[in-house]
Amino acid sequence: MAIQRILVADDEESIRWVLSKALKKQGFSVDLAEDGSQARSLAQKNHYDLAILDIKMPGVQGLDLLKLFRAESPDTLIIIMTAEATMENAVSAMKHGAYDYLTKPFDLTALDAIILKAEKAADLTGKIDHLKEELQDHYSVGRAIIGNSQAMQDIYKILGRAAGSDVTILVTGESGTGKELIARAIHVNSQRLGKPLIALNCAAIPHELLETELFGHERGAFTGATERKIGKFEQANGGTLFLDEIGDMPLELQAKLLRVLQEKEITRTGGNQTIQVDVRIVAATNQDILSRVKEKQFREDLYYRLNVVPIKMPPLRERRDDIPLLADFFLQKSKQDLGIDAMEYSEELLELFKTYNWPGNVRELENNIKRAALLSPNQVLTPLDFPDLLEGKKYQRQDESLETLVAQKLENSLSQMNLHEMDTLYEMVLHQVERPLINIVLQKTRGNQIKAAQILGINRNTLRKKIKTLEIDVKRGDA
């Protein structure tokens, strides 16, 4: 986002004239205001990429104008000019959101340097805003989070109401239901987008190390602590901390987490300095957390502190209507990742998807589709491409003739060949079909060539020649 339009507000005519001439020479569009009231009027009518404001003017003061800009046009960059180079003026200007300030009298080259820096900052802000929009789009309904079932519609409503606030959220559900996706969707649709999203799996870290992962430690806090470690709370400061599998957190650490949530401050292990942290917590667990509370394995007070807004992710078997949508999404994603042009599901496979129990939920569905897309030579995926789902049951393609099956196999094989450089394709394909056909018939007749020739409808001498040409090993059975 380049700077194009600039507002200059100063009660000294000479300052306005010099700045206007210098800025217009660089190609900027410049509006001038001789006092604060005129500057405010212009700002209400027009949008400015940059405003250069004198700190003391008749009418509205520069700092008051700065506050108005921050409230009504937060993307406008502000440079404050002051004739008094006091610390109070500098601190006040920066505290209220000024991009920079200049002390009068100033050299125009200093202003040029600040404007160049401001243009880079504006361009970076534009890129960040674009990335934020992309993130919000990526984690929107219908992109990363798929489903039209009533259960998912209810979750979307909760997301819409809760994401923009700072309330603590507890996401529950079986493994593989998409709890981390929900946490990411909450973060990117909150006011904390642009700040860190830090995730920690409490079940993946040994209990004795979990405290330092969360709160960090000072150098020398214990044997092996050769340097200071910054914990997840400090890393997530200003943003969101996703605590996955919170049900596995040891009781003694639960008490410390509760204190952090109440006091909004931490102390590193081995340290005595309290550190203020501003972190939103999204927690998740695949356990029956209320049962853990009743069994005294999870603190009741911490449970209620975390469970301000509960979100329960349904297992896939309870939202079967969403399976075709999810399957199509994962297939399209796999095709894109693997560079596959054409691939689709058979009706029998979709029926299998809808009747299978999916103990691993959405994650199991995604992994199975990705594996089949990578390994299957077929353009049409069938239950045979998903052996884990069949659980030993025999499957036969329905309504598919031998000719159809051969045609599908031929099409897949030929798509991997450069046909323009071949001149013996017919003979090659014929041999590949003849050889297994003759082999099977000879096996059925236990090597009896007379009977095999009769079944095949060819002369016995012709069969002999083909056996020799195709190098078929004839194993005779008993007479």
Image: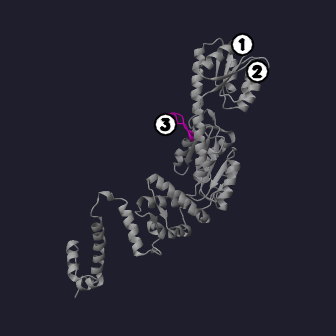
Q: Earlier in the sequence, mark 3 or mark 1?
A: 1
Three-letter amino acid code of the residue under disc 3: Ala
Residue 245: in sight, yes or no? no
Q: Earlier in the sequence, mark 3 or mark 2?
A: 2
**Residue at the bottom extreme of this rendering:** 479
The residue depicted at 69 percent of the width and 11 percent of the height is 14
Image spot of residue 435 (x, y percent)? 27, 73
Three-letter amino acid code of the residue under disc 1: Glu
Q: 121 or 23, which lies in front?
A: 23
Classify 328 as above or below 201: below
Question: Would you name the residue on which mark 3 appears?
Answer: 225
Instruction: Indicate left or right for 14 with 433 as reference.
Output: right
Image spot of residue 402 (x, y percent)? 40, 75
**Quadrant of the rendered image containing residue 145:** bottom right
Three-letter amino acid code of the residue under disc 2: Gly
Q: 419 or 36, which lies in front?
A: 419
Q: 158 or 385, which lies in front?
A: 385
Question: Would you name the residue on which mark 2 appears?
Answer: 36
Q: Label 2's element?
A: helix
Q: Label 1's element?
A: helix
Instruction: Indicate left or right for 101 with 415 as reference.
Output: right
